[in-house]
Image (tube, helix red, strand yellow):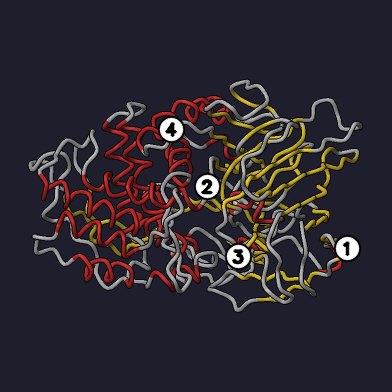
Amino acid sequence: MQLPAHPLYSLQLTPRFDADGASSLTVLLRLQLPAIKAQEPVFVFNTFYGNVPGHPFQEKDINSTDDEGPLDIRFHDLPSQGRDRQQHWFFARDTRGDIVLQFDVFPRKVDFKTPLGARIDLRRDQGGLHGAGNWFLPQLISEQVFTIVVKWNVPADAPESTRCVWSYGEGSKPIVRVDRAKIIGNTVYMVGPVQSYPEVSSGNDSAFCACYWFGNLPPNLDRLKGYNTALFPEMAAFFESSGSPYRIFMRKSIVGFGGTGFDASYMLEYEDSSSDVTDDALIKLFTHEMVHSFAAINPEEDGLENDWFIEGIAELYSSYLPYRFGFRGKDFLIQSVNDHLQGYFTNPRIKMDIRDAAEAMFNDWYAEWITYKRGFAYLLFVDLHLRKHSRSYDFATAGPLDLIVVDLARRNRQGETVRARDWLKSLQKYLGNDEFPIDEHFEDMLRGRHILDFSSLFLGNPSNKLKLEQLPIMQFGFEKRSLNSRVVTGLIRGSSAAAAGLWEGAHIVSTSRSSDCIDDIHKIYRVVVQDGDQTRLIDYLPRTKELAPAWQLEE
């Protein structure tokens, strides 16, 4: 095979099997690198990311060599950045020639108490394995362009049903890409009795979109999986990124429903109760996760993730794009925009600093949604303001905001470092002669100092203004950490939860999805608790009697 003239970055994955199916992976990494000095950081590894602990490697687990023979590897833990933690990997002596690393990785053991987090960990699922590279692969510290070769080495005794898939290709033949090393980590790997839609042949030489899963999907997911394949070409064209394949991976979990976006792919997580998720909710989730693969900007120099943009634009386009592409009507657009807006205005943490929200997001019901809903509301505000300023009223077509987002996303995909300052510069081009305080408004949004005011804005035409309503504030009535401990703590006296009969110390058997209650102001929250030798259902509306002003769209 003739390879492009770039240094080689080769990844070979050998799946191992037991009586229950694929059980582990043996990793073989080969890198063509210039000589590296002893103690110089070569790799960075996420020991904790997105509320998920990384693979528990020890130095002795990594067998590394170069042209001179064995090459001892060392780990060094780095100061934590917010809730996430990393370590550097380096070698004990100077290197010479190609570097080879070999090690085994094992799926994470999970149960119903496992905290929810990013869908990155390697997991067993109905006879197969799947996970993201950044959970079990060290990431090379380099912006060098490599000839990246990914190959599955399927043993002869593997079950006949075994298929192997990577975000950029399927099958046991080498998959070659010219790219930066980071795509090895920010992609998904899947092996076992894989099922797919539509049926696709091995290889990665044609642009298509397909879904992959193990076992049987819930009826609603099975019915709507084709939405992804219809959405992808429309979204690729919108982001001016046509010509590459796209893959959706679906994993079944004991507890959890949601998704995580990666390069050329996303991972959807579902549980048994996901069968009751509405079609419109699935449409929004599918769209949200696919947007992540196209629209992103870099963290700030101090490590702060620009999640207000990353999650905010995914939320905004989950409302816009199904309507613009003709998959849903105007009722869907208005309802989904209103759901997102009330999720912003009725959040009791509406004035929380976005940095504090990032720290608390996995332990606080409301901080979790700050970047999503505040990001949505801010970007919606900017979109409507730009449309009003430029008189581009046709909501079914792209406006100035879309041009900015597509440009920033393109620059980011091409390897340029794109940050909040670039967003603000882009706004300045459109609003430079306007009296709108771009920088001050942005900073107030981040810090929670200013609640967004839509009083002068409208959707589509000047007669269709937003109206101010009074809506009840969210309150689940007990601490979110109770979902992990499975014991109710921090019960709020006088809350709807307490009034419905929930008590401090109650043992939780199961709960409904809290995210449904964030998006739907009328959604009942259900908690099943152990009451003696029986179970007891406690349901209530997780809202207070206190009202908050909230802007909403009218038909």
Secondary element at tag 2: strand
Front residue of this view, candidates 153 and 235 = 153
Which secondary structure, mark 3? helix
Mark 1 or mark 2, earlier in chain: 1
Crowdedness of circle 4 by 10 Å Cα count: few (<14), some, many (20+)? some
Residue carrying label 1? 69
Residue that mark 4 sits on:
242
Q: Is residue 326 above or below residue 352?
A: above
Residue at the image position 63 percent from the left and 52 percent from the top: 185
> Quick check: marks 1 and 2 in contact, CB under 8 Å?
no
User: Residue at image x 43%, y 39%?
Assistant: 287
Label 2 or label 4, whichever comes before in sequence order: 4
N-terminal label among 3 and 4: 4
Q: Residue at x 19, y 41 (%)?
A: 554
Check residue 482 in the rendering and tell me which mark sits there, or answer none.
3
Q: Nearer the viewer, mark 1 or mark 3?
A: 1
Distance, label 3 to label 4, CA atoms, is: 45 Å
| Quadrant holding the C terminus | top left
